[in-house]
Amino acid sequence: MQNIDWANLTFGYYPTNYNVRCYFRNGQWGELEISSDTSINIHMAATCLHYGQEAFEGMKAFRGKDGKVRVFRWDENCKRLQRSAQGIMMAEVPDALFKEAVEKVIRLNADYIPPYETGASLYLRPLLIGTGARVGVKPADEYLFMIFVTPVGPYFKGGFMANPYVITRKYDRAAPLGTGTYKVGGNYAASLRPHVEACHGGQYACEFYLDAKEKKYIDEAGAANFFGIKDNTYITPQSTSILPSITNKSLMQLAETIGMKVERRPIAEEELATFEEAGACGTAAVISPISRIDDPENGKTYTFGDGKPGPWSLKLYNKLRGIQYGTEPDEFGWTWVIEGI
């Protein structure tokens, strides 16, 4: 076990021992390789550098109360990476290769898995990039798939607490039929300026985007899906530009198990005023309860509850975290136990 102040880890990069890599060449994937090098040697004309052929995932491994290490919904991350690869014409990573890479990189860095109840976890970053040299705009013929890991603390300072968010009208996150549904780097690059301008150096946790077509409906935050709760119902937006969140998908299933109704549909901005609770959700934050959403350009503010996480959000958060850490029954078979570490 590493001598790390686990309880005070931020959500950032902390060096570990190894990463794993695999190359796609001559139409096929090679053998999985182990590396201690934190750099990548690629051609200066690689398509990832010029034409944005890059996709990634974010997933976590948890040390449970019983000492076992659990990986949460690896198969869903694999499917989403494959879908992103399809969307921007990259070689898809097969299920077996993805799973082998996940297990190997966790075993190699087992000393960096935070202990139970420290509020920290081991974050895995699968990455797929086009490495083949191209000057004309077309897909690469060579790709690199790799996974590195880092122990992380809460995404938002303070952990599970309510934060203010802000609506930005000046920018769109993605076009309705563009790459918004894929987890590709370009979407995040496009969110950097909106985030800095809208959040005013930390005044808000994150920005929310409205739909690009009508500027009427809530789409998603720069790094998370939105949900609102009212009348015993979990409601989350339906849109052709939102990245499908594995956490949101899980919360929708859990909501039904604790007696809630679930609706996935367009949410007009005015409807925000009717929600009893609201939150942003994703792998990094799990659930980030929302205290209020400001719309400065319209002079409106929507508040939720008393500035603290609402009762339904708390139940969902505890249920999901319980499954991840092994203290709640995993009735859906979401966790994969990595034996012997």
Image (cartoon, grey):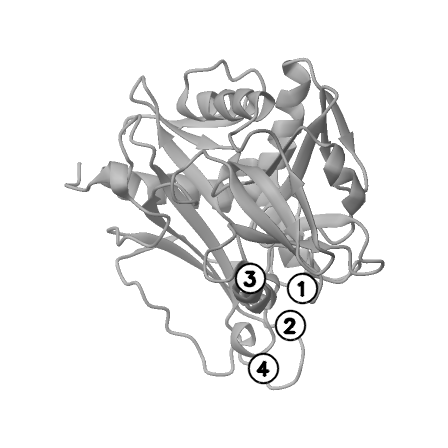
Q: Name the residue under label 3.
A: 195
Considering only order in the chain, which callout, 3 or 4, is on the residue closer to the N terminus? 4
Q: What element carries label 2?
A: loop
Which residue reaches farthest right? 214
Q: Contact, CB < 8 Å: mark 2 with mark 1? A: yes
Q: Contact, CB < 8 Å: mark 4 with mark 1? A: no
Front residue of 2/305: it is 305
Considering only order in the chain, which callout, 3 or 1, is on the residue closer to the N terminus? 1
Q: Contact, CB < 8 Å: mark 3 with mark 2? A: no
Residue 145 vertical position relative to residue 219 in the rendered view, above or below: below
Mark 3 is surrounded, within 10 Å at the Cα level, by few (under 14), some (14 to 19) or many (20 or more) other residues, namely many
Q: Name the residue under label 1.
A: 89
Considering only order in the chain, which callout, 2 or 3, is on the residue closer to the N terminus? 2
Mark 2 is surrounded, within 10 Å at the Cα level, by few (under 14), some (14 to 19) or many (20 or more) other residues, namely many
Residue 294: image location, x then y, percent: 64, 50
Front residue of 130/301: it is 301
Q: Is mark 3 on a helix, strand or loop?
A: helix
Q: Name the residue under label 2.
A: 139
Is 223 left or right of 3, judged from the image as shown? right
Residue 257: image location, x then y, percent: 64, 15
Q: Mark 4 points at which residue?
A: 134
Mark 1 is surrounded, within 10 Å at the Cα level, by few (under 14), some (14 to 19) or many (20 or more) other residues, namely some
Residue 240 vertical position relative to residue 103 in the rendered view, above or below: below
Q: Is mark 4 on a helix, strand or loop?
A: loop
How many marks overall?
A: 4
